[in-house]
Amino acid sequence: MPNQYVLHYSDDAIKSPLLINPRVINKKDSSLTLTGKGVQDYGESAQEDLLHLLENFCSGISPINPTEGQLWYDSTNKILKVCKGFQVNPLIPAINLADPADLHYARDINGIRIPIWHTIA
């Protein structure tokens, strides 16, 4: 599609680029709000994304739609965690393998990719 943003990950060999269509607000492909060309009033979303990055998604609840390698500061337990991959199985109830006690694990909109959070010592 013309005027589409093609956003490349640091290592394109592992992940395909994200395609963001014009005038679209994308909240499903990452924990950040990604805006396509021509989205009005995108400034607040962009500034909030920067703030979330600065604070390492500081919250008692893990981020929605994380990316492998994404940091999350678990403010409830006061520890930094990193998303090290995903459990993929739509037929088995999802659990966070790195922290089974975490009842607030995040997953994608379809409930298929469940992130595995690893505590950084």
Image (spheres, rainbow, N blue to C red):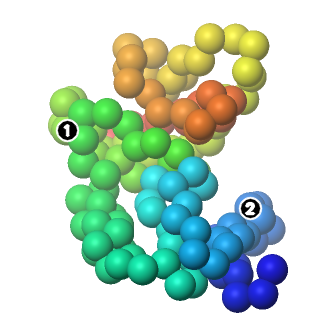
| Residue appearing at x 38%, y 24% in the figure | 104
Q: Earlier in the sequence, mark 2 or mark 1?
A: 2
The amino acid on which the numbered mark 2 sits, given as a three-letter code, is Lys
Q: Residues within 10 Å of mark 1 (few under 14, many from 20)?
A: some
The amino acid sitting under disc 1 is Ser
Q: Quadrant of residue 16?
A: bottom right
Res 85 seen here? yes
Q: Is residue 14 above or below residue 7?
A: above
Q: Position of residue 34 (x, y in %)?
A: 51, 68
* In-front residue for pair 57/10: 57
Q: Secondary structure at mark 2?
A: loop
Asked if residue 8 shows in the view, the reply is no
Residue 80 in the image: above or below residue 6? above
Tell me if label 2 and label 1 are in contact, CB under 8 Å.
Answer: no
Q: Which residue: 60% across, 55% down? A: 29
| Image location (x, y in percent) of residue 98 | 49, 26
The residue nearer to you, when weighing 104 against 46, is 46
User: Does residue 26 sit above or below 36 in this rendering?
Assistant: above
Numbered badge on residue 15: 2
Write the residue at 38% across / 37% down: 62
Q: Is residue 16 left or right of residue 22?
A: right
Residue 8 vs residue 85, the one in the foreground: 8
Q: Residues within 10 Å of mark 2 (few under 14, many from 20)?
A: few
Q: Is residue 49 left or right of residue 112?
A: left
| On-image quarter of the N terminus | bottom right
Q: Which mark is residue 75?
A: 1
Residue at image point 35% right, 69% down: 45
14 with respect to 36 (left or right): right
Work out how far the residue at label 2 is from the one at label 1, CA to CA, in angstroms.
Answer: 29 Å
* Marker disc for residue 20: none
